[in-house]
Image (tube, rainbow, N blue to C red):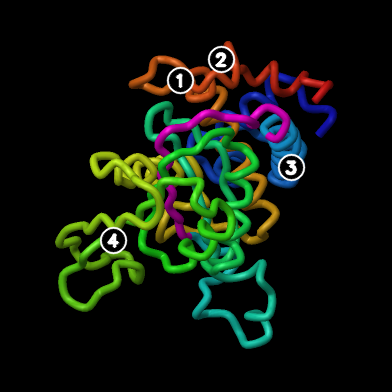
Amino acid sequence: MNSLSKEKKVLVLSSLVEGNSVRSTEGITGVHRDTILRLLQTTAKKCEKISNSTINNVHIRYLQVDEIWTFVQKKQKRLTPKEQEAEELGDQYVFVGIDAETKFVPTYIVGKRDGRTAYRFMQNLNKRIANRFQLTTDAFKAYLDAVDFTFGVDIDYAQLKKLYNGNGAGREGYSPSDINGTMPMPITGKPNPECISTSFVERQNLTMRMQMRRFTRLTNGFSKKLKNLKNALALHFFYYNFMRIHQTLRVTPAMESGITDHIWTWQELLTRSKI
């Protein structure tokens, strides 16, 4: 990997964040897939370190949270009893929070869709956001305890429950039940009824599926290892926050949030030595 020119590294990383799989990137760039994965890993670690050092004391008024599904190696129902003991296999969910105003993503986490992951996610949010804010999630029950334990009464929290036609819960299959409507449910504090929404974070889910081949349904581009999924997420969210100009904002989300004063480039990321 050290023999790769800086231009070649930029070409590889640019391909990955635009929705190409590792093997497609191999075909486009001529770089072996093992080298691509090593470059992804080293760059992802740098992205994580920079993000952890800069995304602190963020001021947010309205935060929307959702989870997006993917899987590693096999879908959960395909795992053998022995494989089900390994948490790094099967269904995985990425918990994502987005600032409804700046479109900045202060944090995300990947894990099973359970109370433990919800708790870890809320703890991470609490470390990064400096002020009291309004939080909207879906009606996943684990959020209730996680938010209460983490924030207590120092938050304005509401859930947005989706109402589906028929008996479908809207979670299974590639053609979920049609949504009949939504029901805002204030939980804690005094959330502004007009801002109880998950529209922006659901749009972020689409961005993830478009820009990471691992999240594209009905393909063979899914993750084979959890560490590769985590590396891809670290690269994606750094690119989204710091490098990609938002079409509506005309700046990057990190600039809109005051986290940085300029658009980051691949050259700056690759040559950044002091973190």
Secondary element type, mark 3: helix
Badge 1 amino acid: Ile
Locate residue 133, reporting x and y percent. 46, 39
**Residue shown at 69%/45% (left/top)?**
33
**Residue shown at 34%/45% (left/top)?**
191
Secondary element type, mark 4: strand
Q: Earlier in the sequence, mark 3 or mark 4?
A: 3
Question: Can you tell which of label 2 and label 4 is closer to the viewer?
Answer: 4
Q: Are marks 4 and 1 in contact (CB under 8 Å)?
A: no
Q: Are marks 2 and 3 in contact (CB under 8 Å)?
A: no
Residue under label 2: 263
What distance separates the C-alpha of mark 4 from that of mark 1?
Answer: 32 Å
Q: Earlier in the sequence, mark 4 or mark 1?
A: 4
Question: Can you tell which of label 3 and label 4 is closer to the viewer?
Answer: 4
Q: Earlier in the sequence, mark 2 or mark 4?
A: 4
Secondary element type, mark 1: loop
Label for residue 41? 3
Question: Can you tell which of label 2 and label 3 is closer to the viewer?
Answer: 2
Q: Which residues are magenta?
A: 52-69
What distance separates the C-alpha of mark 1 from that of mark 2?
Answer: 8 Å
Count neighbours of disc 3 (C-alpha within 10 A) and say few if under 14, some if 14 to 19, many if 20 or more: some
What distance separates the C-alpha of mark 2 from that of mark 4?
Answer: 37 Å
Count neighbours of disc 2 (C-alpha within 10 A) and say few if under 14, some if 14 to 19, many if 20 or more: some
Badge 4 amino acid: Lys
Which quadrant of the figure has residue 2? top right
Q: Is residue 83 left or right of residue 173?
A: right
Badge 3 amino acid: Gln
Label for residue 161? 4
**Residue shown at 55%/43% (left/top)?**
24
Label for residue 170? none
